């Protein structure tokens, strides 16, 4: 099981979200819940850093002319760069659910 998928991450994500939504100070919230403020602050930082790490740079690849005779349009693929230098070319008309499933397999920790 990956670190991000563990129940511990889900537990602390819920606690931090609850504290933020409560409008209470961290100290007051922690006193009511029986957790330490240092835990909440540490998990807030850890969750923030994990969210930043999920962003992936996307660059538009210049279109290349199709080589078939009579076709005057150009392909407008989007290249999605994955971890480890791998990439996927996404052509116009792709199925978003299919792409999400593929990315879940190729980048399980993201």
Image (tube, rainbow, N blue to C red):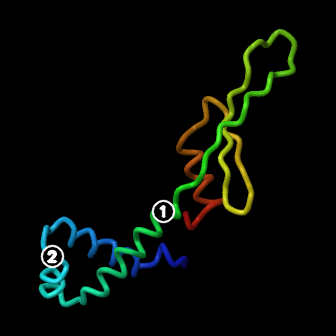
Q: Quadrant of the N terminus?
A: bottom right
| Cα–Cα gap, marks 2 and 1 | 25 Å
Task: Kindly identify which numbered label has been placed on residue 25.
Answer: 2
Q: Residue at x 64, y 42 (%)?
A: 59
Check the image and report above or below for 73 versus 109. Answer: above
Residue linked to disc 1: 52
State the residue at coordinates (86%, 18%): 68
Furthest residue to the top? 70
Q: Nearer the viewer, residue 94 or 4?
A: 4
Picture quadrant where residue 72 is located: top right
- The kind of secondary structure element at disc 1 is helix
- Name the foreground residue: 93 vs 30: 30
Observer-nearest residue: 17 or 99?
Answer: 17
Query: Vertically, is 104 above or below 96?
Result: below
Q: Please say if 67 is above or below 101.
A: above
Residue sitting at 34 percent across and 72 percent down?
A: 13
In the depicted view, which residue is nearer to us: 83 or 109?
83
Q: In which quadrant will I find the C terminus?
A: bottom right
Element class at badge 2:
loop
- Relative placement, left or right, of 6 versus 87 is left
Residue 45, image x, y percentages: 39, 75
Q: Is residue 54 above or below residue 42?
A: above
Of pointers 2 and 1, the one earlier in the residue sequence:
2
Label annotation for residue 21: none
- Corner quadrant of residue 33: bottom left
Crowding at dot 1, Cα within 10 Å, few <14 / some 14-19 / many 20+, comes out as few
């Amino acid at each position: 099981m990956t670190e991000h998928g563990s129940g511990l991450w889900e537990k602390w994500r819920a606690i931090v979200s609850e504290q933020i939504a409560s409008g209470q100070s961290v100290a007051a919230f922690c006193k009511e819940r029986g957790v330490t403020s240092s835990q909440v602050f540490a998990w807030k930082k850890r969750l923030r850093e994990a969210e930043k790490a999920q962003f992936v740079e996307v660059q538009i690849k210049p279109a290349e002319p199709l080589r078939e005779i009579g076709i005057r349009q150009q392909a407008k693929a989007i290249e999605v760069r994955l971890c480890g230098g791998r990439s996927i070319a996404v052509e116009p008309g792709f199925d978003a659910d299919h792409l999400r499933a593929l990315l879940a397999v190729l980048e399980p920790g993201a």
